[in-house]
Amino acid sequence: EAQLVESGGGLVQPGGSLRLSCVVSGLAFPSHWMSWVRQAPGKGLEWVANIKQDGSEKNYVDSVKGRFTISRDNAKNSLSLQMDSLRAEDTAVYYCARGGWYSEFWGQGTLVTVSS
Amino acid sequence: EIVMTQSPATLSVSPGERATLSCRASQSVSSNLVWYQQKPGQAPRLLIYGASTRATGIPARFSGSGSGTEFTLTISSLQSEDFAVYYCQQYNNWPRTFGQGTKVEIK
């Protein structure tokens, strides 16, 4: 059974950092692009970043460039998102998703709240 | 960045009726468009990819059409489980962008 399980969300002050993780099972993780997509409370979806199978290519939405870093560990079937210099507008549920273009497989999401 | 615009924002439909949702791209995305369904507290569920191909396990009452800049999702006969928010998303360019969503509610 396909499973994507995110962790690492929580409350952080503006300017702070947080690292999200996603462990994937049942989905041939090393063979696929992976992505992070977020959704602010009560709002729509925003594709944040994606990463190629071998990590050699990464893309970021402009609003997080220079602040967020996507990475992966294929030996551990794990995807990460290092988030630095966090802002109030980064408050959202962050989803891990298989694929770099669209996704059929999503995690349940982890909530990140940026507030003082 | 390609801007995706969905209409209407809210669609009130009775069970058993047909629902037609629209999505417009600010520039051509060819057929590189998907539709998702999202219910409260859940992750999005892929319905349609390539503008018109149903994803695995999606009922035949869901159909997608269009190419270029104009796209449509049709639900032929609404079931109780179909009341949700629907998003279109283009994957022709980076960044991938979503429409703002159409909420399908019970009339």
Image (cartoon, coloured by chain):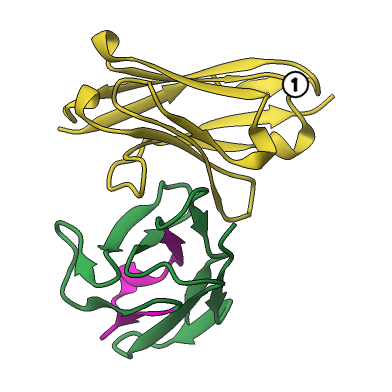
Chain colours: A yellow, B green
Spot occupied by residue B81 in the image (x, y as percentages of width and height): 32, 67
Would you say A105 lies left or right of B85 here? left
Q: What residue type is labelled 1?
A: Ser
Residue at image coords 58%, 76%: B9
Spot occupied by residue A63 in the image (x, y as percentages of width and height): 68, 39
Identify the residue position indicated by label 1 in the image.
A85
Front residue of A62 and A42: A62
Q: Is residue B75 above or below residue B99?
A: below
* Chain label for disc 1: A
Magenta residue span: B70-90
Spot occupied by residue B48 in the image (x, y as percentages of width and height): 27, 65
Label 1: few (<14), some or many (≥20) within 10 Å? some
Residue at disc 1, secondary structure:
loop
Residue B71 forms part of the magenta stretch: yes
Residue at image coords 34%, 63%: B32
Image quarter for residue A53? Answer: top left
Q: Is residue B65 above or below residue B46?
A: below
Q: Is residue B17 above or below residue A114?
A: below
